[in-house]
Image (cartoon, grey):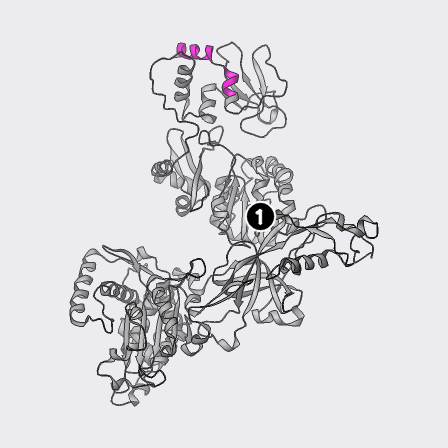
Amino acid sequence: MSELRNQILEKVDVLAEYMAIGIRIAKGAKPNAAGWLPCHSFFREDKNPSAAINVGPDLKAKGIYVDFGENGTGGKPWLALGVFDMLALHGPYIDRNQAFYALGRKYGVITGEAKTGRRDKDQPPTLDDVARFKRNLTPEMIQDLRDQRGLTEASIARFEIGWDPSRERNTIPVWEPAPVGKRLVNIRFHNSKKTPKTLNWPGFGEARLFGLERLVQAPQGSTIIICEGEYDCQLADQVTGCIGVSSTNGVKAFKPDWVKHFHGRHVVLLYDADKEGREGVHNLVLPAFREAVESGRVLSLKVIWLYDKPDKEHKDLTDWIVTDGGSGEALKKLIEETPPYAYPTSIRHLPEPIELKSFTEIDKSENAGQRVTVDLQVFGENTVAYYAAMKIKVTHCQARVEGKCNGPKDEKTGQSNGACQQDIPVPMGDRILIAGVRATESQFKNLLRDYVCDRDKRPTLKVEDTDKIVVREVFAHQIFEPMQFNQKNQLDKPIYVLGGDLVEIGKYKATGRIVGSYRDQQPVLLVDTLVPQDEDYQCFDLDAARPRLKKLQAMDVDEIALDLSYHVTRIYKRQELHLGVLLVLCSPLWINFPGEGRIRGWLSSIIVGDTGTGKTSISQGIFEFARAGDRVSGLTASRTGITYGLDHDERKGWRVKAGALLKMSRQALIVDEAQDLPQHELKTMAEGLDTGLIKIDRIQHKTFESTTRTIFSCNPRDPKQFSNQRKMEDFRHGCQALEGLFPDMMLRRVDLFLFATSGDIENKEEIFNPPQDLDPPKVTAEDLRALIFFAWNLKEDQVVISPEVGQEIRHRSLKLSRVFGCDKPPIVYPEDFRKTLARLAAAYAVLDLSTNEDF
């Protein structure tokens, strides 16, 4: 083999092979007597040549690459590799052996069709490669990643870390956004005990922004942490919940063009605290971000050094967490307490916001012009987006040409400051940012002229496309406590959010400046930071709730319902109604039904009953006791829309406002007086009850989530006379009271029907009079709340329906359908009833806490 190696090296054009994989030869350099040719490092960014390749005739040295690290071209080499190794690392070959045989054939030393295993340079890594490497990861390797890198098994799985046995390195896939989802652009191979520590997939080593596919999905106003290295990036993501990103190929590989992806977000630089990390931040990263920070496109920039005096073992986030006992909470506190980076020249920084107790305080005069932070509920949007100018150019001013004006006067000195002769940045939070909202082009230009010029000289202005930022108009109101919604006291108001992303329905903490609208002068909030807030149920802590769940697990379902009847609703002799409300509240969101896969698990119910039967008191009482869900009246919803309201204006676009059904998605809702809901509302919500989605085809197929556990409470009425209320005793069968209340297409999608008549309990006093010798209450509000939130947080794989139970459900549903199935009304519809029964069974199992002690 050594003879064959010498034959290949004797013929190889070493310089040509190295040039083909991107070697940078020093300008004007020539080989010395020993054949060493100075070049730049393959593994670092170096200003002066710090490496060399041997192109001489001595076969013992020919083709070798040496790297002197930080020592320049003198002293002991930091690294030495042969040409076959270098072509395997940076060329189109998988390993050294393949490079060896490929060069042998290329230069005629090896003939025939020898298999070299060559992989073309333009052949990218595949998802199969990622999956193959993941399968190689043993429990011991996972434990090593936990011990050495601080990564949990969940993070290892989420970032799809694997192992390549041929390279003896961990693998980390690198993704970029795609029109749908993400696409694989590189696989990085890492082993800190090898030199170099990290390799790229051959031919795909271009510098990338690791985590870009997650960054572009991050909400406006969120915090992004930029680290040095993929492992630190993954650890930052894990311990803080913030998106972590990192430039591949080292600290000096950061591209200024990447800054645009951080617009509308807060950025934290968390690089290694060593010399190379600090130089990279100060010489490359900070200059790259400067324009975006000063213009307000990037909301803030913070620089954090975890070590004042770093060394080899104490320099980065992994060292700080794994070795030195740091934590995610400590890091989040450090980020919060670190002031924004101030560039050497003075720029306008955002003032600290005033915290408002309620969104209703926006209208208070003392808050005018203030930067505030407030919790609010976003419930709608304007589908039209608007542009705002972040930088304005004065291309011509006749007064300036004539020497009569040198720009606006400085507020302090009263002298013209010459600002018109430069680009004029618009500070974040300035009212002019909403000048383009619903304005014509001429109106917009006039407002910009007034902003630029205080002398009414009408200069010619230009706003480059790259100097614009999108402003979205969304609609918000104050946060209501559960079951405290009151339409009369709701303050609906538009807010204006900087950034291009659509704002989903939900609760947010908004930070911005209160300014006056150009259209009607009403106070509005110009938002620079919008952070999603978890609903109460999303903060559920199973460990804290376990004692309460164990307490309820020891009680049977009837005992729970009876206790609530006696001590909460004070409605007696109505066990079925109590049970029905509890089933709806405790239904999981999704379940897997054997043989049919994933189906909805949340329940919807209709309660029809006479006035005075306790139906409203029971449902509302249980909701209020648990402080879960909300209630809306059909009388109010008929005006505002229980699903959504929709208005159109040629310049304003479509303005969509979500109703209660959409705002309470994944939670629970009582619709009282449902007999007064208009038929078009009921038809709209029918599909949403079943699929969890409501589509608005008039707005480019806009879709809203509506996975809402819903209870419709109503009185019977005469179908021929809309306002004529009847009694349940007027109907031979209770289900006949549904006629005229709900369309058939909706009834098919409802799971549970409950009927209450004033005549089914002979002694009416028994409904409201408590029995004698009542036991003390057993179920507390926190107990019931824990049970409901436990149900709302269940994942579909946690609700197990065995194949045998699935068959029994089908058998029972078929049997019941034969007895009760009908088309008018379709409350037991043969084609759907097996799924309904599966949902009821799953909800009952949750209510009964039919699980192990660990839940």
Position of residue 743 relative to residue 811, above or below, is below
* Place of residue 790 in the rendered image (x, y in percent of width and height, measured from the top left): 36, 63
Query: In the drawing, does residue 71 fall left or right of residue 743?
Result: right
Residue at the location (59% across, 24% down)?
50
Three-letter residue code for mark 1: Val
Where does label 1 land, which residue?
A: 268
Q: Quarter of the image containing the N terminus?
A: top left
* Place of residue 801 in the rendered image (x, y in percent of width and height, measured from the top left): 24, 58
Q: SS at mark 1?
A: strand
Disc 1: CA contacts within 10 A as few (<14), some (14-19) or many (>=20): many
Quadrant location of residue 434? bottom right
Query: In the drawing, does residue 743 fall left or right of residue 484?
Result: left
Query: In the drawing, does residue 414 fall left or right of residue 45?
Result: right
> Does residue 124 appear in the picture of this structure?
yes
Q: Is residue 847 magenta?
A: no
Position of residue 831 relative to residue 287, above or below, is below
* Place of residue 774 in the rendered image (x, y in percent of width and height, measured from the top left): 31, 83
Query: In the drawing, does residue 581 fall left or right of residue 335?
Result: left
Image: magenta residue range: 2-18
Query: Is 503 in front, or is 709?
Result: 503
Considering the whole magenta stretch, tell me its main secondary structure. Answer: helix
